[in-house]
Amino acid sequence: MEHYAIETEGLTKTFVGFAAVKNVALKVRSGALHALIGPNGAGKTTVFNLLTKFHLPSAGRILIDGRDVTALKPSAISRRGVARSFQISSVFPHLSVHENVRVALQRKLGTGYEFWRSNKTLRVLDERAMELLADVGLTAYAGHAAADLAYGRKRALELATTLALDPSVLLLDEPMAGLGVEDIERITALIRSAAVGRTVLMVEHNLRVVADLCDRITVLQRGQILTEGTYREVSANPAVIEAYMGNGHV
């Protein structure tokens, strides 16, 4: 029997009469690297906002590991092991790279970033913080201000802070946005590594990355699921080709 880390039933979100998401039945297998793709305005980020409870559904249910979480608040979703990154890099620019990761580790412990506490009391987190920085190739930048990092390295730092929460389900919202070719290759490798032992659902416009990383793809159009399958299957689907390119190729 299939086990789904994420499942939605009839998921719908309307804004002043406009249905941004309509009756979406999404199933993401546990341990899968699953992509949610579609043309601009398809409703992908709205689905993410619904899954993480930044938006309340107008109708339908959301299940995480088989448990109904539709009524839960965002903080409760996080405690269920769901972590999310955003399209725009969201690090603390004036803290060091190391401090950014340590803040995330404090959050995992259920405490805020307590500026009044001495460094001695936080050193228990240092070893794990450095391990995470090593995982994303940022050891040499540990003492640098996050604001001074190149954009690609900021995205790597954001991934490290997300992994600091030790999520079982990782939601990545356009992780390749704004990256150059070299950074895309590096972040792709990091995501592949981060996916080991986790479920990953990613929204991504770079279809080469999707083809390389993802074993299952759901295509949205106008807030509804158009089709689902492997990259080979969806890229050959005439309805998907029409949605993306008119008469071109995905």
Image (tube, helix red, strand yellow):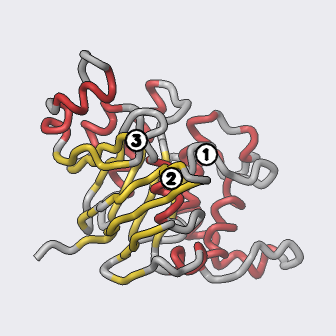
Name the disc covering residue 32, or none.
none
Q: Assign a secondary structure to mark 2.
A: helix
- Quarter containing the C terminus: top left
Relative height, residue 205 to residue 224 (above, below): above
Name the disc covering residue 46, or none.
2
Amino acid type at image mark 3:
Arg
Which residue corresponds to the image point at 33% horizontal and 64% vertical from the top-left? 199
How far apart in space, not on screen, are marks 1 and 2 (Cα)? 37 Å
- Camera-nearest label, 1 or 2: 2
Q: Which residue is mark 1?
A: 140
Say whether marks 3 and 2 touch (CB < 8 Å): no
Name the disc covering residue 222, or none.
3
- Camera-nearest label, 3 or 1: 3
**Residue 227: horizontal and vertical position, in percent?**
22, 45
Which residue corresponds to the image point at 50% horizontal and 46% vertical from the top-left? 137
- Quarter containing the N terminus: bottom left
**Residue 86: horizontal and vertical position, in percent?**
57, 50
Q: Residues within 10 Å of mark 3 (few under 14, many from 20)?
A: some
Q: Assign a secondary structure to mark 3.
A: loop
**Residue 51: horizontal and vertical position, in percent?**
47, 65
Amino acid type at image mark 1:
Ala
* In this rendering, position of residue 167 left or right of residue 129: left
